[in-house]
Each structure stands twice: as C-alpha cells, then as structure tokens.
Image (cartoon, helix red, strand yellow):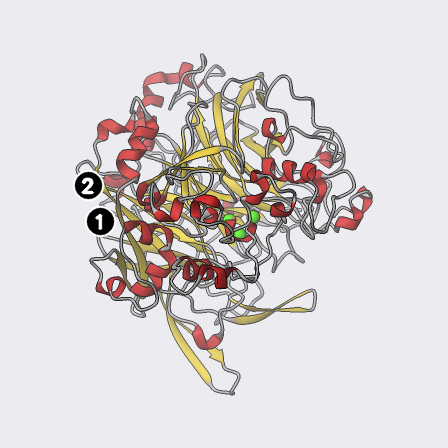
Amino acid sequence: MQHDIRPDALFNNEDSNTSANPHFEQVLGARLNRRNILRGAMGAAGLGLAGGSAVAAGHGAQASHKAGGALSALGFKPVAKSVADQVSIAEGYQYQIIYALGDPLDANTPAFRNDGSDADFERRAGDHHDGMEWFGLSANGRPSEQYNARGLLAVNHEATTDEKLTSFFLHADGGKASLPRRADEVEKELAIHGLSVVEIEAKNSKWAYQPASRFNRRVTAMTEVELHGPLRGSEHAITRYSPDGTLARGTLNNCGTGKTPWGSFVSGEENWNGYFFRDAKDDERRGKDDRQVAGLNRYGRKAGAASRHGWESAGEIDRYQRWNNGALGKSARDDYRNEMNTFGYVVEMDPYEPELKVRKRSALGRFAHESVSFAKPVAGQPVVVYMGDDARNEYLYKFVSATKWDPKDARPANRLATGDKYLNRGKLYAARFGADGSGEWLELSLDNPALAQYKGFAFKNEADIAVFTRIAADAAGATKMDRPEWGGVNPRNGELYITLTNNSTRTPERTDAANPRSYTDLKNGKEQKGNVNGHILRLAEAKPTDSAFKWDIYLFGAEAAADSSNINLSNLTDASDMSSPDGLVFSPSTGICWIQTDDGAYTDKSNCMLLAAIPGQVGDGGKKTVTHQLTDGSRRQVETFVGKAPTEATLKRFLVGPKDCEITGWCETPDGRAMFINIQHPGETTKMADVGNPAKYTSQWPANAGYGAGKRPRSATIVITKKDGGVIGS
Ligand code: FEO
Ligand code: CA
Ligand code: CA
Ligand code: CA
C-alpha cells in the first residue's frame, strides 16, 4: 500500500536545522531544552530499558533528532490513503491497542463482554476517546517529568455512537428508541461520558494499562464538580442541586485538552447544548425580562428543543429531571432552568490526585470548547490561553490572566490551587481578522463600549460575559470562522495554529480573507457545499499579551486532484491530501505538528488519518486570489494569504485509521519514543437495526485486530513506537 517514491527523495536525516530565525533558540519550549540536558546527563543508563519507552530492544536510530530537539525533515515514507478496516501505519512503525471502551478500571470490575450486557461504566473506560494528555510517573509511582516507561493518560470521553436517542452498541438489543427512555439504559449513557485517568506501563517490550492502579479514575456526567471563576455563586449557576451556585454535576462532550504550565489537565466541553430539553411553552413562562432566554437561543436551545438522548424522560427523579432546562418551579432554586449554564467550560483536573474534584474554569468563557493552548509562560507576564468555539461561524478566543506568571508555580505543591490563581480571573478576547493579513483581539469586558452599550443583551458584570461569551463576542464584532477546532502553539516560534475543520454554511458571497473558500464537491455522487475540506490558520503576535496579530493560512485541506487555483491552494499531493483537520498538537520533543482528521467528505477515498508536518512561519508564502462564481452569474474574488506550500519533507500522512473513525487525542512520552493517539467511533455509521448482526457493522475494530471480546466496534487508545526504538517521526 506504500507509495512508490524513491526513499532518498523522502529521507532527510540530516542533523541540521536550516532555519535562520534568530528567535529560534530563545523561544524553543523550555521542556524540550530541559529534557535534552537531562538526556545528556543521564547518558545510556537513562535511555535504557528501565526508563525507556521504546518497546523494541534497540534505542539506536535517532539520526535526525538533533541535540536541540527539533526535527528539520520527516524521516518516514508516507502511508497511502485507505478505506480498509484497520490501522495502517508508516513502514518501520508498530502499534498496540491498550485501552478501549468498557475496559475495567479496578480489579473488581469484570472483563468487558462487549455484547450490550455490561454495566458499571463508572468503573470502566468511557466511550469516544478524544483529547488526551500524558502525566508521567517514576518507576515507584511518583509524578515524573523524565521517566518514560510509566505514566497516566488523562482521556476525554466525548460522546457516544447513537441513533434515535440511544447509544445502541451499549445495549443488548440496541435500546429503546422512543420516549420515555429506560432508566437502566440512561444510566449507562450518563456514565460513558466524561473523563478517565488510567495508568499505563511498558514492561518487557509491551505497553499495558494497569487495571488495579490507585490513580485510575472516572468523571462522568453525574460526578460532582466545583464551579470557579465569575460563574461561581452568580445568579446563572443557581439550581435545585446547588442553591448557592457553587457546585454542579458532571462534565460533558469533552473534546480537546491541554496541559497547564503548572502540570494539571484541562479539557474543553463542546456539544453539551444538545443534551437539554426545553418545552415549547418555556419562553412564555420565563417572560420577556428573563435574560436567560436570549442566552438559551444563542446557545442553540430554543423553546421546544428536543434533547439528544432524552435523558430527562427516564423518570421523575432528580438525576433525570436535571436535563429538563425549563423554568418549571417557583424559582431557579426549585428547578433546573439554569442547569445548561453549568456546562460549556474548560474544566481542570489533577490526574495525580484522584480525590480532588474537577473545577470548571468559567473565566475562560462558555462556548463549544475544543482544546486549550497555553502560550509559553513568561515570568512576570500574564498566562495566555488560546481557544476555539467549534460551531459553524463561531469565534476564536484568548484568555489573559490577571495574575502574572511566577516560574516557581511550574512545580507547585497544589496544582488545582495554582489553577485558581491563574484561571479564575482575567480578560477574554475574541479575534477579528483583517483582509490585509492583520488581526485584532477584541476585549470582552464592560470596558469595551461595544459590550457596555450592546442592544442585544444587557451585560452587567463579569459573570454575564463568562456565561454568555458568544453574545459578548457578537457585540464586539469578532470574525465568524469555519468551525475552530484544536489549537497548538509552535514551540519553535510561539505562533498559534488553529484548525478550521469545515463549514457547510460558508457561501461564496460570505467568504472572507481568513475563510476564503466555498465550493461544491462530490462524495459518491452526493453534493457537499461550503468550505468542504477545512483549513489551518496561524497567528503571530509580537507578545502573547498583544492585541494585534498577523495571520496567514498554513494549509488548505483538499483532494490532491482538486482545482489548484481555488481549492487545492496548498498543492497537496497523494502523500499529503486530507480533509477536515481537527486535532492538532505540536510534539514537545521533536516540534512536529501532528494533524488529525475528523472527516465526512473525503471518506469515500480514505478513512480519517494522522499527518506529520514541519511548518514554517506566518508570511513564508504569499497572497492568492480565490475566484467564486456567484448564483447570479457574477464573479467574486477574495484575496487571502497562504503559507509556503509543503513538500514531502515537511508534510505527509503517517497513519490511517479503521472505518468510520476519527483520529484524535495526542500525547507522547518525554523522550518522544512512544506516541499515544485515540481512534474514536469506528463503525459510527452502522445502523441501529443491525446491532445484532456483526457482519453489517461498518467496522469491527478493534476486535478484528485481536483486542477484546465481542465484535462491536470500540473507541480505543493505541500506542505507536518505532520498531528500531527511535524517536517518532525521525
Ligand atoms: Fe469534538 Fe469539534 O470536535
Ligand atoms: Ca474535535
Ligand atoms: Ca470535528
Ligand atoms: Ca468527534
């Protein structure tokens, strides 16, 4: 399945960084430099089997992984596109499946039968593994930033494969697909959402998760969490469960992740709004003066909205009634009219401290959060966080902390208390993109007259901005984007990369410089419209606290054969063509930008994939003009800024997943020799009616790769290593 390309044209294992950028060494990630110093000090023993992550015996080949850490060219052959129901990986690499939906997280929970009869998901891996971060342990189980053979994975469990209300693979017969839902089915569905922490270890060349680890943990849609930041104690957080507005239950639709500069885990709540029911009379009952109505409408819960799973219908008890978002009682203390206001945040968890509650960081705003990207912290400067809101035509955000960074907080005694210090107070900004390649961060505070005087919503305080962040960004005049997904900060130069996955509602008339494409594409003869294949934008700021930035588009997703003047603007080839970039993470050890797809447009030609990139910098390409044919027959031209086109040394496909999956979640061991990714929702388009007929599943992965019982497809974490034990990507 490999492309027939001369290896000498692909391998560039030279130990040289050709960049002349004078800022390179100054801004290269501190972790990367620290680690290389350690590697030097530890010598061969430190890289030996005791501390090494490599599952192969050898540790020799790391030719292009220079002492400075950053790779200058990708050292593997590209993987061909594939629609096979398997993981296809670059030659010279191997993978193991280590942690799948339903795997027990303690010694007393029975093995997963995978036939719909399993219960106790509070003590099993959740569904739809998504964003994921590595938290190292030493050989004797203490937090460690250097050891490579033992660690914790903190994993998001975003959602579940469903049809007509039910998560059909979890129920023996697919479940009851009408209201009211059955309580036993709803209990499973509540429990497979949220987060997990799982210990993993490499022994005798094999990685395995540790079912009896004391660190193993689940946070579900029912786990008690603390509200922090402006939301805490505000009118918006008052519920029957928490009359003082300080507590809530659960985290939902956790998509992207991040790791704080103080060593904790952060995770973004994404598509939570669809989980709430609101009856058709709710606006009327609430009355014209209730500001919540404008908020509910702007966040996609108009009166009469049905919920995704119908959980509110499972019974009169509180744990089901909380999903009914109507004003049904005498006041907010008597019902769950405000329950939806307790979702939509970045949540912070300390994976090393299973007893500590998750904290919702409302100062970072409420929207369909994806990943959480920290700028490299600078002593005496605010901590800066970049975030996207993944819905069509939503915005890009930045948070600037009120508290200035103290480098002593990099290894604090109490990580969540340190989170309180930096993430509970600060200012939010939303991005406006100029047609000339400039941009501006617009302040979302009452100091901004556009908000203070906004006719669409009466903003009174910080809590209003924290909860109704989208409305604040509307008021400020932010630019509507093509679904901002994950972001990543390039350790070479501090530039922010953000994936804009696609946008079916971007019309040619409404294209702009930063979202310049709208076209029609065919998939199996069916028309797809808008920005079908997505793009990756990047921003450069002189300092992360600046309000001005420059931007360009690093890469346009496209089919290699698509029109190169209007669609395939980055000249993607058979080795690099892809659609709907979603996950994006820069490796701390090599600087490789790993790009993951969550695609529904090019899937007739290839399942979703993982690509490796070594990008340049904002402004390294040039201007391009995209020409649109409008419906009235006229032409419209939009100028945009496109990064230098990649070559096969700087962008290629590394892995293709099984059928109907999304590739997501990315982390690695500190030495860059073991990489973990998630295969989310293989077999997602299977019909619920076929749940009893494995031959009709669109995927049987990971069972068909030898993992676990049953044939129902399962989301799972895999670990990737190089067969020669080398650094991944080198
Ligand atoms: Fe969970 Fe927008 O992806
Ligand atoms: Ca995503
Ligand atoms: Ca996506
Ligand atoms: Ca997904």
10 Å neighbourhood of mark 2: few (<14), some, or many (≥20)?
some
Is there any visible trace of residue 77 in the rendered image? Answer: no
10 Å neighbourhood of mark 1: few (<14), some, or many (≥20)?
some
* On screen, residue 406 above or below 339: above
Count up the numbered dots: 2
Secondary structure of the residue carrying tag 1 is loop
Going by the picture, which residue comes out furthest to the front?
Answer: 330
Q: Which mark is residue 381?
A: 2
* Residue at the image point whose x is 42% and y is 29% from the top: 357
Is there any visible trace of residue 335 in the rendered image? Answer: yes
* Residue at the image point whose x is 51% and y is 59% from the top: 282
Q: Which mark is residue 543?
A: 1
Estimate the x, y position of residue 654 in percent, counting from the top left. Answer: 55, 44
Estimate the x, y position of residue 66 in percent, counting from the top left. Answer: 36, 33
* Residue at the image point whose x is 82% and y is 44% from the top: 695
> What amino acid is labelled 2 in the image?
Gln
Secondary structure of the residue carrying tag 2 is loop
> What amino acid is labelled 1 in the image?
Lys
Going by the picture, which residue comes out furthest to the left?
Answer: 380
Real-space Cα separation, disc 1 to disc 2, in angstroms = 10 Å
